[in-house]
Amino acid sequence: MKKNITINLCERLFSIDEDAYEMLSTYEQSLRNYFRSHEGGEEIAEDIEARIAELLDEIKAQGTEAININHVTEIIHRLGKPEEMDSLSPDPSPVGEGNNKEQTFTNSAALPFGGAGRGTKRLYRDPYDKKLSGVLSGFAAYFGGDVLWWRIGYVGAVLLCFFGSTFNFLWWLPGHHFYFNIEFWGFALIIAYIVLSILMPVAWNPEDRLRMKGKEINPQNLAEEVSQPQTVQEPAEGQKGCIGGFFFILGTLFRWCIYAFGAFIAVISIIGIIILLAGCFMSHETWETIFGHNDFFCSPEYLAIEPMLKIPLGIFVVSGLLFLGITAYTIIHSLLNEFKQMPPMSYRQRIIMLMMWIVGLVTVGSSVVYCGPKIDKAENEYHKRIGEEWDVRDRKENTHDGIYIQAQEWEFLQDNGWRILKADGCNDRFTTKGQYLTDDSDVRYLDCYDNHHRQRYRAERTDTLQPGTYQLTCAARADGTGAFIYAILGDGQPQFKEIPATGDTGGDIWVKADRFVRYHRDIAIPSDSVAYGNYQCELAEANDHKGYGWNRIIFESIRITKPTILRYGLTSDNTFTRHTWLGQWFSATDFEITLVEEAKIPIREELQDTSKVHKGRIVIVRSGETLATIAKRYHTTVKELCRLNHLKSSSPLHQGQKLRVR
Amino acid sequence: MDVNNAKSQMRKGMLEYCILLLLKRQAAYASDIIQQLKEADLLVVEGTLYPLLTRLKKDGLLAYEWQESTQGPPRKYYCLTADGLQFLTELDLAWSEIERTVSVLKHTKI
């Protein structure tokens, strides 16, 4: 299917194919150009034009509906090239004065004719011989040489740049250090290719193709060019050679990568445009529904700079729209053009687009450079203020008895009945988790750290005990001397037990567990102590079989004759202990008070057989405890507790109740 | 030496003379001149004629008048001027001389 137009030539109408018309008008123009310098040149051209009309008339008279390119080719062939017409004029050897003069005219006129001699060869992209966009075939046509060598040279140069730096085999080149980063040149080559493929026009029409090849634009060449079968290379054809195949695959791959990348950029640009437009036309509420609320834009810090930003932001939006619009339009246009949906942009259009794009880019860039730091500064101030305000509120909300305790620590202390009595130099931290006896990292325990050895810490818990003999145990560790577990019975003097400075590995609990595990390794563990045995295994395996340094601290034989308050806890307060704290950290956990039934003889702990020590053990129920939590703590089951204490699993427990756990 | 080139050189010399001869016999449209020259195998490309006609007209050897044609716009109808006739007579003489020279050269045995 061809586009058909009607032309008026010497007052006669002809319908003619568009390509035929292009050719005819080029021919006519070349005639006019050629004879312009002749005396009466205009008349010659007109005469010839009249002749063309006559010939077209003849063709029409034969019943041809529309003049096609073959007709025009035939006519051009018949009438001849302008210089052919002229070359039949008298010989260069002077016959007369007038002739001589005319001849010189003719010669000088030969160059401008047709607008192109060899001197006006131009760079075009060749759409009919391309692997990517035809830049290199254009180069080959312009500078000469086989296009294959150009391609090998280009790809080789790019690869050399990328792999050259990898293998550094260019070290012997003089001044190689000057190529500060050879990969840069690889990228530069690729960028250059892309820029050239944007800037170099495509030689679609025969005239441009002649210019590309550096041939003269004359009717004969035109006719030749037009009659050449010109198809965009099909994948299958002309891919016989190995190198050709390689370039084809490389080209196709690269081309699709470029398409995908282009499409991606276009989509991003369009999204950008939508967001910019949305920002302009959307109401504040709609914007917040979609993009979320940002307090910053309501803050005094932002409102203070807002008037300053109004104009730059307006410029940003407009130039941003321009920039993104051109980007998206150009890419979509090129893609459509690539798939033959749209004629390519003219050279002029390209230049204008490029200029506008650069202007857009520069304007966007400068408005960002202008606004960015201002907004950043305001945002930093805003965040600083909000942070400070939050800190103040947090401190206010989480200060208990004059001591700031973070929420989760406070929760833990409350739940376990701990009170912090002293907190000098404790870095606002009283508990921690992560190095519990077993590797259970969810268990929180009392802990204090300060690398200046300055902390005076005292955490205390209180229990009311009924008459009997009790034992207080806990696990504790420290990395220096001067940290104590203490117990005060009623109004009596405090008893101190120093925490061994075992650091964060080993510790007697681990040693005991390790021995237990080694001892039981080859003999079956009794079925009723499976849970206990497992617990020992967990202790032994903690911290990669190194333990966390925990030691058992025991206050034996706390004899009570009438209901008395027992206060006990962890401290490093030298005003209280009369000892200087010399470490950085200490921890304590698993405080337990057990009723020792046979109170007359203090029970000594025997390392070799730990299970005996705990036999017939009775514990005191603390507030908030249930059968389940106790069962868990003593590594037994609710069922077992019920059996030992003749309880039902639903029975309520009360504070101070004595419970047999073994 | 290219035969075609030599032939075209010869034609070149003769073309003006032949056109004048044609027009002496009968005034004609350019297309008629082309027709006849082509029949005589004197014309390779038609375009050649037009610069020639323009030059001859400029030199005052021939003139034209606009003639209405049966279809289309009026066309140029060329005829020989008195100067042209004079010029042609001289050319006739020159041609006879050339003819004689060639004939002598051709038939004389050296």
Image (cartoon, coloured by chain):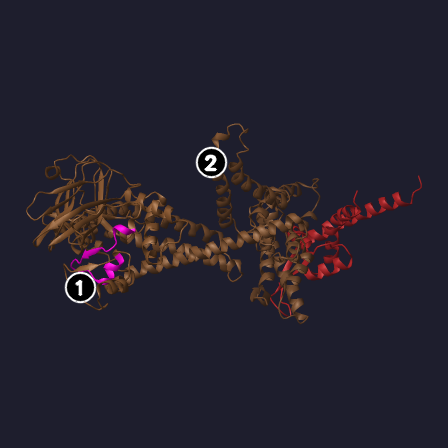
Chain colours: A brown, B red
Whole-percent x, y for residue A264 in the image: 44, 56
The chain that hosts pointer 2 is A
Tell me if A74 is positioned left or right of A478 in this view: right
The residue type indicated by label 2 comes to Asn
- Asked if residue B8 is among those painted magenta in the image, a careful observer would answer no
Marks 2 and 1 share the same chain: yes
Can residue A460 be seen at all in this image of the molecule?
no
Task: Tell me if A598 is positioned left or right of A352 in this view.
Answer: left
Residue A269 in percent (x, y) is at 39, 56
* Quadrant for the C terminus of chain A in the image: bottom left
Q: Is residue A526 above or below residue A139?
A: below
Amino acid on which disc 1 is placed: Leu
Q: Chain of mark 1?
A: A
**Res A527 → quadrant:** bottom left
> Which disc is residue A653 wearing?
1
Q: Residues within 10 Å of mark 2 (few under 14, many from 20)?
A: few
Write down the residue under mark 2.
Answer: A181
SS at mark 1? loop
Residue A207 percent location from the top left of the image: 59, 53
Q: What range of the chain is rendered magenta?
A: A611-632
Q: Answer whether residue A442 is visible to the viewer in this image.
A: yes
Which image quarter: residue A570? top left
Q: Residue furthest left?
A: A491
Q: Is residue A623 magenta?
A: yes
